[in-house]
């Protein structure tokens, strides 16, 4: 899965799955633009990648802010000259039963998890169309496929990403641009670290492989979908869930 000469933009790269995706893409030879709100963590990640012989630059960006998305991607294009691979990974949760969920928490999750992906895709598409090659990879969730009590906003945003993925796939396929989604299951990240041990143990019981996934498990799938080896795959949702949901 050689990615030499490719430029990747990863959102939500300061930690968790995004952090792992940036490291793996760089490890396969891509130059990586890492984006998130925390500039210090981004610069630490870029330095880590550079120390291992890779190429990475930090671009602070709050994906909930359309103006910041536009300015940051403009800066990435100015710095690297193009964007070949977009990984829409940034996401948040604001969990609550739907009868108690505040409209602000609904809006925040949809804006960050779904609307930002549309805006990022819209900004990188011209570069991909120009070179007639591109990889759009949206990080959705198993809960966008099966739902989850207390996460109506999160599940809706992740289900929306799946529909967005397929619509974009149909729009840009003729230009050798693929659009795919990855649906992680229960992955050990800072977002899941706050969950109770009882919840985690119950979750593992639902996973045939008998373990919680890692950010590297997801990043390996991202690197594959970004490569030429995945050139005939588009509009697909790749499940990385240990068998938690099948079919």
Image: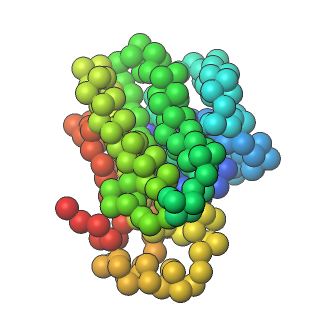
In the picture, the quarter occupied by the C terminus is: bottom left
**Image coordinates for residue 29, horizontal then vertical, percent:** 50, 41
- Coloring scheme used: rainbow
Spot the residue most to the front: 99
Residue at the location (29% across, 36% down)? 166
**Image coordinates for residue 146, horizontal then vertical, percent:** 33, 61
Q: Is residue 169 left or right of residue 50?
A: left
**Is residue 79 visible in this depiction of the protein?**
no
In the foreground, 156 or 161: 156
Spot the residue most to the right: 40
Above or below, 106 relative to 8: below
Residue at the location (47% across, 18% down)? 127
Q: How many marks?
A: 0
In the foreground, 100 or 244: 100
**Is residue 174 visible in this depiction of the protein?**
yes
Spot the residue most to the left: 247
Q: Is residue 39 left or right of residue 56?
A: right
**Image coordinates for residue 150, horizontal then vertical, percent:** 50, 64
**Image coordinates for residue 190, horizontal then vertical, percent:** 63, 65
Above or below, 177 relative to 2: above
Residue at the location (53% across, 86% down)? 198
In the picture, the quarter occupied by the N terminus is: top left
Q: Quadrant of residue 77?
A: top right
Q: Quadrant of residue 169?
A: top left
Residue at the location (36% across, 35% down)? 164
């Amino acid at each position: 899965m050689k990615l030499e000469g490719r430029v990747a933009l990863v959102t939500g790269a300061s930690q968790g799955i995004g952090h792992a995706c940036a490291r793996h893409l760089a490890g396969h030879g891509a130059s990586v633009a890492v984006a998130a709100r925390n500039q210090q963590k981004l610069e630490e990640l870029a330095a880590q990648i550079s120390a291992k012989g890779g190429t990475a630059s930090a671009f602070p960006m709050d994906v909930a802010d359309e103006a910041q998305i536009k300015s940051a991607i403009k800066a990435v294009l100015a710095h690297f000259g193009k964007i070949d691979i977009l990984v829409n990974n940034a996401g948040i949760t604001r969990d609550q039963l739907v009868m108690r969920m505040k409209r602000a928490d609904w809006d925040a999750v949809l804006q960050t998890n779904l609307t930002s992906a549309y805006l990022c895709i819209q900004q990188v598409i011209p570069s991909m169309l120009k070179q007639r090659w591109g990889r759009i990879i949206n990080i959705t969730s198993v809960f966008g496929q099966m739902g989850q009590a207390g996460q109506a906003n999160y599940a809706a945003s992740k289900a929306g990403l799946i529909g967005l993925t397929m619509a974009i796939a149909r729009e840009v396929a003729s230009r050798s641009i693929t659009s795919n989604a990855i649906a992680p299951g229960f992955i050990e990240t800072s977002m899941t670290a706050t969950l109770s041990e009882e919840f985690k143990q119950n979750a593992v019981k639902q996973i045939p492989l008998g373990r919680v996934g890692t950010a590297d498990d997801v990043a390996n799938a991202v690197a594959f979908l970004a490569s030429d080896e995945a050139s005939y795959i588009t509009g697909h949702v790749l499940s990385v869930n240990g068998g938690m949901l099948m079919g």
